Image (tube, rainbow, N blue to C red):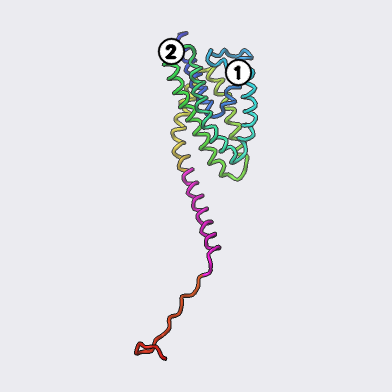
Amino acid sequence: MEPLSALVSTIALTLGVGWASGINLYATILTLGFLHNTGHISLPTGLMICTDPLVMAAAGAMYCIEFFADKIPGIDSGWDTLHTFVRIPAGAALAAGAAGEVAPAVQVAAGLVGGSLAASSHTLKAGGRVLINTSPEPFSNWTTSVLEDVAVIGGLWAALQHPWFFLAALTAFLLLMAWLLPRIWRGIRGLLHILARLFGRRDQRREADGAPPSLPPPRRKRLPPDGTASS
């Protein structure tokens, strides 16, 4: 039973760090480092880098920046776009480290799965934020941002302390994501069409306002019935 429990714990941690990195990478690193340094968990060798004070200080500084950027409509979407190139490879690296001291092929496989999970959760977050930003009030952004941070911390805690429960919750999340992503994509396409029509009308109005007034057509000189001009 012990080997099965250890295997499930390793799988849950591997999938957990990949999933959490796609939502908030810096909160993921801080949570892992804090839980290990306070004696609540023991991280595998591949994740011990998260416990380094310098790494935690850098993650803490970036988390503070993201905490505010993530709550400003428009800024949050720009932040998510930039972090497409940060969260996904970092999630893959953390997932490979969470696999522990295993064969290189297993680490590569763990990195691929973790990177894919990071890409999935990041896509769901970024796409959802684009639609949420259409709301005129800022409270939906604030609430969503706080819930994302709570989900990251609670999800990692569950992956470490209750791996079976986390795997069941992750399965439900993946099913929900498969249902939501096509609808989010349709919503984004509809929003882009609305913006295209809006800016197209503005361009037409500008062209109409700047066009010179049309001149009447030149009048043709009428000739006598015999077709010769009078002298």
Question: Residue drawn at (45%, 27%), measured in percent from left and top?
Answer: 116
- Circle 1: element type: helix
Instruction: Point out the stretch of residues depicted in magenta.
Output: 187-213
Label ID, residue 89:
none
Residue identified by numbered label 2: 103
Q: Is-magenta flag for residue 190? A: yes
User: Residue 186, image x and y in percent?
Assistant: 45, 42
Question: Residue drawn at (59%, 33%), measured in percent from left and top?
Answer: 145
Residue lying furthest top: 2
Mark 1 surroundings within 10 Å by alpha-carbon count, few (fewer than 14), some (14 through 19), many (20 or more): many
Against 228, is 117 above or below? Answer: above
Mark 2 surroundings within 10 Å by alpha-carbon count, few (fewer than 14), some (14 through 19), many (20 or more): few
Q: Amino acid at mark 1?
A: Gly
Residue lying furthest front: 231
Residue identified by numbered label 1: 33
Q: Is-magenta flag for residue 178? A: no
Image quarter of the N terminus: top left
**In terms of sequence position, does the residue under pointer 1 or pointer 2 come before the other?**
1
Q: Amino acid at mark 2?
A: Ala
**Closest to the observer, 150 or 59:** 59
Q: CA distance from mark 1 to mark 2?
A: 25 Å
Judged by depth in the image, the label closer to the viewer, 1 or 2, is 2
